[in-house]
Amino acid sequence: MKMKMKMKQLLSVVLVISLFIQLQPLVHADEDIDFNEMFAGAIVLSIGSANAISDNTDLMIDENNFRITPFIKNQTTLVPLRFISENMGASVAWEAKSSTATITKGSKKIQITLGSSKLKINGLSYPLAAPAQYKEGRVFVPLRVIGEAFGKKVFYERGIIVISDLVMPQLGQNTELIDYLRFVLAPFDKDPYTGRTLSVEQIAKLEQSVVLLESFDREGASLGFGTAFAVGYGLFLTNYHVIADSSSYLIQTGKDRYYDVDGVVAYNEEADLAIVKTSIRTNIPPLRIGSSLKLAKGQAIVAIGNPEGLQNTVSTGIVSGIRTMGADRLIQITAPITNGSSGGPLFNRIGEVIGINTMGAEQGSLNFSVPIEYAGSWISVYSKKSFYNIQVLNQDQFREQEPTEPDEVTEPPTPTEPIEEPSTIPVTPEENVHSFPFIVREAVVDPAKPIVYAVNESESRIVAYNYSENKSTTVSEIFNRPPQKLYYANGELYAIIANADYSSYRFDDMQGGKVVVFDPVTLQVKDQWNVRIDPYDMAVDRKGHVYIASGSGQWTNIISYDRQTKAELSAATIRNASTIALHPAEDRIYAVNSDTSPRDMEMFSLNEGKITAGYDSPYHGEYKLSTIIGLTPDGQYLLNGYGGVFTATNNRESNMQHAGGINTFDVMTSDPVRKDLFFTGKGQTISQYDTATLKVTQNFRTKGTLIELLQTGNKLVAITKISTAGAPMSQYAVEEIL
């Protein structure tokens, strides 16, 4: 999803421009400037900045490399070829052998070769102001030549570049508007950490990493705001109460840039902490994390927050005391914490974050901060992950309650209530809980042995873990990137690995990855082949047909392959990062997308491994959808994590029709061997359903928070994440349920 220029940003732009018009006449004093109209269809860049605007939408030039910026060399301005071309609606192909880029738009074909002082337009040669250059893995070309080759007007002043269909003399006459664009597009600076004592003024400059986090209800009305700060590129730490009971969020920086929030990555309600992830990877630099363990009374501190919406207000004070409230430890400070400051960073005098400001009392100047150690394990884990591999949680648990509408014609589906209160359900016995000695990314279960095959996130390898013996039995080789997905089928273990991080802007010619097939006993690689997409999700049928969906490229591909010949059998269009589920009859695949609002489901018909047809759900927003889907073991119903039950037929007229509701869930598992029951899970509760009635027949309580549910025949195990009081890190475990 792209980061859009939000309405209040546009209003502020209009306000600023209106003031400029009053203070300094333009070429036509009676003509107001409409920012949207002026920059419609235009590309706006700034020398040395990774930030850009395209058709009034804020973008990163390259989300994977913030060093891809326009630059000047030998008095010639050079811009990234692919970004410019694709934002003009052209396609770019790269031929490595001749080092030639071919840009195609309509009937126009432009060819540029590295080092050449000429370019070709439809076969005719034209001189270049400077040869195309290769930098940071990207091709850069002279600004004016590429702009004019597309028939565009090019504007340049004081580092601001505009490529547009319009001539913009009024922009050149408006010093304040150029200043505003320079401000909006200004790059962020990495914190020059020295370990030395800083002045308050120096610590205040770290405000670039502190943002305002606003929350909204399901109708888009603002519910309030708090503060958050960057702990990774696109990851922001805040208070749980800032994101609770909300449907969506927006981040605003002090540079007046706005980012949609993709969702909540992790939370701890008791500690009042949460980490959120933006929809695109930002270049806001993470703050340096320190320690609160050696704090002393009287020690000087600095806080940054947004009290009453006054963005990035800096406050100073001292540590008043270290307080213990129950099992929790809090830092008492004199710096004020008021409405809007919640979630802001607390700094020591060397510029390290030592706490997260959480609450203050109106009387008595009692203000408290949560020690940074409470979020330390999150920061350690997620800062090491690539942005596109960080998954957000099911957001339904954070949303405000659905208002009741007694007069509605269509009643919402009624969930099946658990047969017991969660507190009365016995927790998994200690002897059935087996801890993994590593961070688990993905797991599947062996159908015949007490073995879980799990991806060791830290080592980028697969581990066979025998949970009855509490030990790893075999490990695979180490891969250059962690496998994204595992799948057990036909006596073989499958894994998919992408060549690079997933990105909506990694289009077809940039994508690639591989399918790896293992011997489950030895975890030796039996076979592998390259695929032309960034593999994200997979399924394998009983005849050895492998189905792979891409995680990159917006409108991208789902492709089928023959396991034995490794040949590509067919392809169809799908949204990137869609979750797929193979029907028990293996004659169709269902999918739900993750990057549109409202979400949509679709179905692909299969015939001998070939995708023969596809169509969308008959609904578009009438029913809420999560990214979690599954099928009942008899194949009659398609289930969505939001609680929706939909028909799963081979007839377009009756397929994907809403049929009712069950409890919301984050994980689901079923096995055609046991057609009479299936399982869903949410938090620490597993529900067993009767397939015929879709009623809960039994509940189970896990020791940890559910990550995966794995069923094979009569066997059910759960992969969980267990947090223990006093332990510095959570542990991953396999819990034997049945």
Image: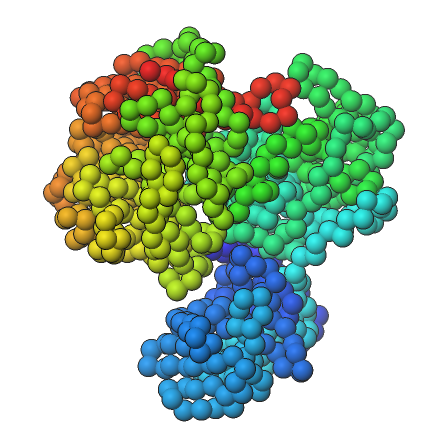
Please count the marks in the image: 0
Judged left or right of residue 715, residue 261 is: right
Spot occupied by residue 497 in the image (x, y as percentages of width and height) = 41, 48
Nearer the observer, 705 or 21: 705
Q: Measured along the vertical axis of the image, is residue 528 above or below residue 357?
A: below
Judged left or right of residue 312, residue 300 is: right
In which image quadrant can residue 61 be found? bottom right
Q: Residue at x 38, y 34 (%)?
A: 522
Judged left or right of residue 62, residue 110 is: left
Nearer the observer, 3 or 132: 132
Colour pattern? rainbow
Spot occupied by residue 526 in the image (x, y as percentages of width and height) = 33, 44
Q: Residue at x 39, y 64 (%)?
A: 509
Spot occupied by residue 24 in the image (x, y as percentages of width and height) = 69, 74
Residue 258 visible in the current orientation: yes
Q: Measured along the vertical axis of the image, is residue 706 above or below residue 386?
A: above
Spot occupied by residue 74 in the image (x, y as percentages of width and height) = 67, 82
Q: Measured along the vertical axis of the image, is residue 270 above or below residue 19?
A: above
In which image quadrant can residue 350 be found? top right
Residue 404 visible in the current orientation: no
